[in-house]
Image: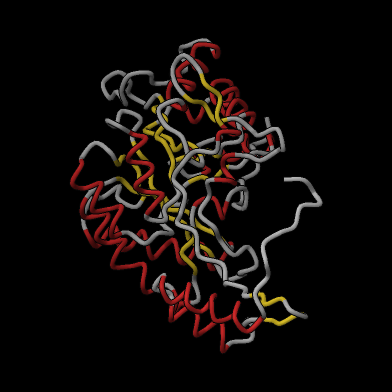
Amino acid sequence: MSDTAPGPRRRPASRRLLWIIGAVVAAGLGAVLAVIMLGPGGPAVRGDRVEVVLPPLAAAPSTAPDPDLVEQSPDGPLPIIGRDGREPWRVYARPFDATDHRPLVAVVISGLGLDAALTRDAVARLPASVTLGFSPYTRDLAAEIAAARKAGHEVLIGLPLEPADFPRQDPGPETLLTTLDPSQNLLRLKWVMSRGTNYVGLVGIMGQRFSTVRTSLEPVLEAMKQRGVMYVDNHAAGASVAGEIGRDLGMAWAVADRRLDGETDAAAIDQSLASLETIAAQQGVALGVGAAYPLTVERVIAWAPTLASKGIVLAPASAIAGRQQVPASPTP
């Protein structure tokens, strides 16, 4: 049809309005139409034109990876910073009101994915603001991450790091070791990062030895920064150099102020959670890291509803990135 071809015959305004009403009712949207017709956003008549403005529909949460933030590798997909500067840790973070100045407590439950029943229970019952960490050895990790994100959680992948008594304790295949050349550790890091997509970053598994050796940890954190992902260290700042390195690199980082279940009884876990409240009140933010134990999950579920009355906000780990205090390095 040319630009000068006549268009369809226009109905008078009154008949067009009746046609619109009939079409909407026929589609089963009578209740929506009532709001549109009676509310301030109802139909507007301009000359012989009638405009009906529908309110925007809420979009379902997306669990698909952003293709601009994915690099395909022989091992699998790797996170990258987008050409427009968007970083995966920000894009996949759980939304949070940054103008809320109340004390913030973040909780990470790590080691999920290996026990299917426990994982389903934790994803469904833990508050959505709790950040979930999945084992890199999880079968069909991509599907598990998608389910967690659909439930509103942001996600971390576990990074196996050398413990103090390796190999008596062994986090698993592809563990990063202080005895390896940095290039070898970076290959292992890539393997872990390629296990899934849609995650904000990595959380340490064990690592009592690795997280204290700057020459081993720094190249790893620098590689994470270059790919726009966050690192959560499962040790307190005094027992890890992750916070110091993260601050110096200007990356997204957080370190555990408390290990929630170093002692696996209810009273000890409750005490650890209470101490997070104290730290948050004093310093503005606090982070607790716990394992995917049924008791830990239950205690966090019971504790979370008590925070609002105390003026404390349960926040995702990404909301406290880079906001914790880092102890000064000892003078040589």
Q: Is residue 48 above or below residue 92?
A: below
Give residue 119's position: percent from left, percent from top.
25, 46
Specify the quadrant that holds the N terminus: top right
Asked which quadrant contains residue 76, the reply is top left
Give residue 328's position: percent from left, percent from top.
65, 43
| Residue shown at the point (59%, 46%) measured from the top left | 90
Q: Is residue 246 above or below residue 63?
A: above
Give residue 3's position: percent from left, percent from top.
80, 49
Q: Is residue 171 left or right of residue 275?
A: left
Specify the quadrant that holds the C terminus: top right
Give residue 121's position: percent from left, percent from top.
23, 53
Closer to the camera in the image, 76 or 7: 7
Closer to the camera in the image, 59 or 19: 19
| Residue shown at the point (70%, 32%) measured from the top left | 83
Q: Is residue 208 above or below residue 51?
A: above
Q: Residue furthest bottom?
A: 38
| Residue shown at the point (32%, 26%) measured from the top left | 171
Asked which quadrant contains residue 48, the reply is bottom right
| Residue shown at the point (62%, 83%) measured from the top left | 42
Q: Residue furthest right?
A: 4
Q: Is residue 199 left or right of residue 171?
A: right
